[in-house]
Structures are given as structure tokens and as C-alpha cells.
Image: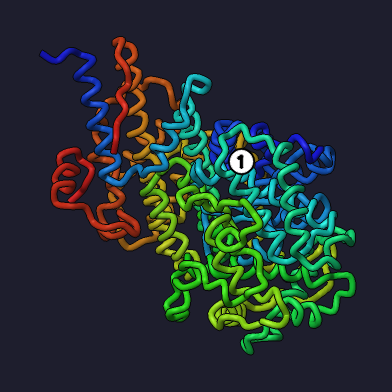
Amino acid sequence: MDTLIAQLQRQFRDYTISLYHQGFLDDQFTELKKLQDECSPDFVAEVVTLFFEDCEKLISNMARALDQTGNVDFKLVGSSVHQLKGSSSSVGAKRVKGLCVTLKECCDSQNFEGCVRCLQQVDIEYKTLKAKLQDLFNLEQQIVQAGGRIPQVDI
Amino acid sequence: MEKGGFSPVGLRVLVVDDDPTWLKILEKMLKKCSYEVTTCGLAREALRLLRERKDGYDIVISDVNMPDMDGFKLLEHVGLELDLPVIMMSVDGETSRVMKGVQHGACDYLLKPIRMKELKIIWQHVLRKKLQEVRDIEGCGYDGGADWITRYDEAHFLGGGEDVSFGKKRKDFDFEKKLLQDESDPSSSSSKKARVVWSFELHQKFVNAVNQIGCDHKAGPKKILDLMNVPWLTRENVASHLQKYRLYLSRLEKEKEIKCYSGGVKSIDSSPKDAEVNSGHQSPASLSDPNTDVIMPPKTKKTRIGFDPPPISSSAFDSLLPWNDASEVLESKPVLYENSFLQQLPLPSQSSYVANSAPSLMEEEMKPPYETPAGGSSVNADEFLMPQDKISTVTIQDLDPSAISCMKQQEFSSNVTNNTEAILRSLNWELPESHHSASLDTDLDLSCLNGDRFLANTGLYFQDYSNSPSLLSELPLNLWYGNERLPDPDDYSFMVDHGLFIS
């Protein structure tokens, strides 16, 4: 009979693996987890929070730039997406990073519609990731509250 | 900082990056390497810190793209004013960017995401610089011998644990130096030479000279020196610089795996050439010289050391470099790299270098991303939103212009998020695939996530995503995954089950 802890741990493991398999996360996220220790027990959550704040800021920069009808500063959009690419590479946000590459190409070719579509996707993508990571952290908390250990998941 | 008691533990690192996420991660990683870390979000701030405590840092790591100052500019300042080793970082690994880093004096160029093992070895750059200082100052500029000593010392330190004390090694260094002094040209060993700083200008002269010589296979240190026409520079200085330059270029080519350098690329890094090519040369001494007891460390210890000569495989290069003027026969391959490689690059502006201006460089870089268009963004929402969809809390006109013009992060309150969505939605209305107003409401559902603290338990478990990607319903599949492959059928069904994919 599976205890609650065991069930939660299994869910945690499955969910983590699915995030990698679906391409939401890559091995940089694994590296982040390795950096977490007793000195900084919430390291991953803190870093990820910073990342999502950065996302908001950069995406709104870009949205605003694209909103200047007839006078879109593609260079500004380009530099913002470059920053976002760097930022997403820091947490292993694989899909976001991939979309940044596409968005950068649209910027370089000054493809307005392409930029808008891409930016919309980036927006949805980071929010989706944020929700998923929230779920993951919730699971962790539940495990800890139930008195269990958070399992190490090898991808 | 005294040269005697140097140790990688406690190495004082200054990290400069405008990305707060990376700054936090790098700080953690460097601390795990037992370094002493100072972080900085702006290039000017970094310069201020460095100037304030001239001897306060051992090495600087900086991102290439900074909002207030070009990372290359910072690199130049640090290199020239303070002569500290600087490592550049970027998410962009384009050759031209990397080359620019080298030209401006970077001792390494790391690609993001950066790994622990890359940071674990940065102390070698500091050591190498110090050894070079010692070498230059004490005038032991005898050609291959000096570099060989450096490699030997490095090999020692590579083999050791984290707690390597370099003070002790200094004595070994002196001993080896004396040993080799007997065999080297006596006339060059005793003179005290001034320290050579390879400034941007000087390096440019060097590169120009190499270019000029071209591919007639005679790009030896002597010829380069003659062409450079820098009276105080010696052949030894040029020789050691040339070696580093060639190694960098060949490494670059290897990494790029450019097919046009046919047949040449691999051989550079293959087994060392015969010692007979340069009979008088000392560097294969480890193999053939009976006078030294030095043993080259095993290959398994090889680590990547950026642009500077790796401790082991570079023995291959010594035989390729003409330390003796008499036997200045170069393999065609290294020169071929240089030649073709250099020809691809436009020479940087020849204008005299002024500390605070480098117009050609600055123009290439993008303007700081935090410039605002003067007009603000007072877009008339009526143009975009259908009357029945005007939502009172979320109109563009509500936006406070000052919130836009000020790019500080704290100004980006929830207004901005709603505004972003409004803009995105408004932009969406312009597109042929306009959406039913009902789908817009679901965006607001997502927006409620934005303001939450991340760790707060929102009670969400497996959220139903069936509504959220509605905006994507018209978009082609390949865009959903950016540049990545489409999902496997297994993944496909998994996602459909979880409402992640809208057919």
C-alpha cells in the first residue's frame, strides 16, 4: 500500500520528468538544483522568480516597441530578446529560449507580424512554465509537510 | 598583492552582468569554487569599484552586452588601466564576437549557460598572468623555454588539489629557470626587460604585420617584429605572443569545424611533430633532453584553458614555431588558418585609440536597450478594441506615461502586465485571425498569476490549460515549438490529455 509520501514523491518524479521530456526544461535546470544547498535552501525558487520578473519586464518592453505603429524600433526589440535569451538560458527555460531565437530572426528581418506572433507565444510560454514550476514547488512543499524527502530525479 | 602566497582559494572575482538571474547564479557558482565574489550590475559601477581598490580584485568576469557600456569597452579599460585578466561571457557565440573579445584582450570567452567546470579553472588566468609578469620582468625571455616552464608550472598546479600554494612553486620556477639558463642563449638571459603590455594598439600592429606577411610561409617572430616597427619590442615578446595567437586561432577553427580548411584542422592537435624539425629547440625536452628531470603530466589531466596554451597538447606547437631564425620553416597549415581566418575579418578602425571614444566599435553595438521612444505609448484603444470588449481596468489610455519612460524595474507594477496583454491583444486584433471576445477573458485568468509571490501556495495543482493557449489556435504548429522538433506521438497524446494542445 503506497503511503501518502510515496505517492507524492512518485507524482513529483513523474511531473519533473515530464517537464524535461516535453521540452520545458533542459539540463541547466538540473545544474540549478545542484547549486541549492543548506546555505541557500530556496535557491532555485529565488532564481526562477527573478527570471519571471525579467520575463515580464522584457516582454512588456518589446510589446511597447511593437506597438509604435509605423515606427517600430526593431533594434530595441532585438536587444530585449537577446537579453531574454540570456535570461532563459540561465534557468533552463528551453522553450522560451527556442522562441527567442525565432523572435530574434523576425526582428532581424523586420517582420512585424512574425514578431507579434512570436512575442505572444513567448508570453504564453513563460506563463505556462511559471504555472508548471509553481505546481512543482507545491508538490515539494507537500512532500516536506508530509514528512518526506524530496527525491532526486535523474533525467 | 604579493606574488608569493598566491592561492586559487579566495580568489577575488568581480562579476559584471546586467542580468540579475545570471548574477545570482554566477555568484553562487563562484562561491562554490571557494572564490571571494563581488557582483555588479553595471559596467560603470564595476569600473568604479576597480579603480577604488586598485589591488582589490584578481580577475573580472563580464558579460558582453551591458546597457550602460559596451562590454568590450569595459574590457579595454580594465586591461589597460588595471592590467587584470578579464573573461567575457555571452549567450552569443558568434566567431566575430569572440574574435572581438580576443582583440580587446579578453583571456577567455565563455558561452552561456556557463558550467561549474569552466569557473573552476579561471584561477589559471591569474596565475598565468603573474608568471608572465615574472618572466618579463626578470628577463627570462628565452623563447620556448619560458613557455615550457609556464606549462610545467601549470601542470603542477593542475595536478594539485584546491589548496595549491604557489609560493612554494616559485622556488621550483627559479630552479628550472637556472637549469635552462645554461642551455639557452646567454646573451638574452641576463638583461632585465621592461614588462610588455599587449595593448589593443600593439596587438593591432601585430595583427597587421601578420596580415602583411600573408601566406608566404615566413610569418616568423623576426619578420613580424620588423614590420611592427616598435623599437622597444623584442623578438621574444613577439614570439610568445605569436604562439598564443596561433593557438587561439587553431582552437577557434577546430571549434567551428570549418570544412574549407581541408585537412589542416586536425593535424594541428595531433601527436607532436618530430623533434628533428627543430634540433636546437628545448620544448620537447621532456621527451629527449636528459638534463632535466621534468616529467610531463599525463594527458588525462587536460583541461580547457581558454585562449592560452593548454599545458599538454601545446607541445605540438613548439616544433612548429621557428625559434631559431635559421630553421624558420613553418608548416603551411598554421599560416593558412591565420591567413584565411584573418582575411575574413575586417580590420578594426585604425584610428588612434582614445580612452573614452571608439566610434567604430560603439556604432556596431546596439544602443542601450533602455532608451524610450519619446512619444510614449498613448495608443488609442478604440482603434483596436471592439466597443463591447472595452474592459475598464485594462485600457492603454490608463497607462501612466511616466511608468513607461522610467525603465526601472520597480516601476513595472501590475499595470504594466495588464498593459502588455492589452497591447498584445490589440496587436492581435490587427491580424486576420481575430478572436472571439470570449477568448480574451481567459487571458485575464492567467494574469492573476503574475502578481503572486512565487512560493505562495496558490492551491493550484494540475491546472486546466485547455483555455490558455486559445490564442494559438490559429497559429501554425511549428511556431508553438519555436525551432524544436514536433512532439512524438506519445507526447502528443499526453499533451492532448492534459489539455496542453489545442487541435
Percent coordinates x, y for residue B394 in the rendering: 47, 39
Percent coordinates x, y for residue B36 in the rendering: 67, 32
Residue drawn at the location 50% of the way across and 71% of the way down: B268
> Mark 1: which secondary structure?
loop
- Up the image or down, A28 lies above or below B105; here it is above
Q: Is B432 positioned to the left or the right of B93 in the image? A: left
Q: Residues within 10 Å of mark 1 (few under 14, many from 20)?
A: some
Residue drawn at the location 58% of the way across and 36% of the way down: B30
Q: Nearer the viewer, residue A68 or B137?
A: B137
Confirm whether residue B146 shows in the render.
yes
Percent coordinates x, y for residue B50 in the rendering: 79, 42
Q: Chain of mark 1?
A: B
Q: Is A131 positioned to the left or the right of B397 in the image? A: left
Q: Nearer the viewer, residue B181 or B16?
A: B181
Quadrant location of the N terminus of chain A in the rendered image: top left
- Up the image or down, B246 lies above or below B40; here it is below
User: Residue at label 1?
Assistant: B400
Residue drawn at the location 69% of the way across and 57% of the way down: B70
Residue drawn at the location 85% of the way across and 65% of the way down: B354
Q: Nearer the viewer, residue B170 or B41?
A: B170
Confirm whether residue B372 shows in the render.
no
Three-letter amino acid code of the residue under disc 1: Asp
Indicate how the structure is coloured in the image. Answer: rainbow
Quadrant location of the C terminus of chain A in the rendered image: top left
Percent coordinates x, y for residue B362 in the rendering: 71, 64
Q: Residue furthest bottom?
A: B216
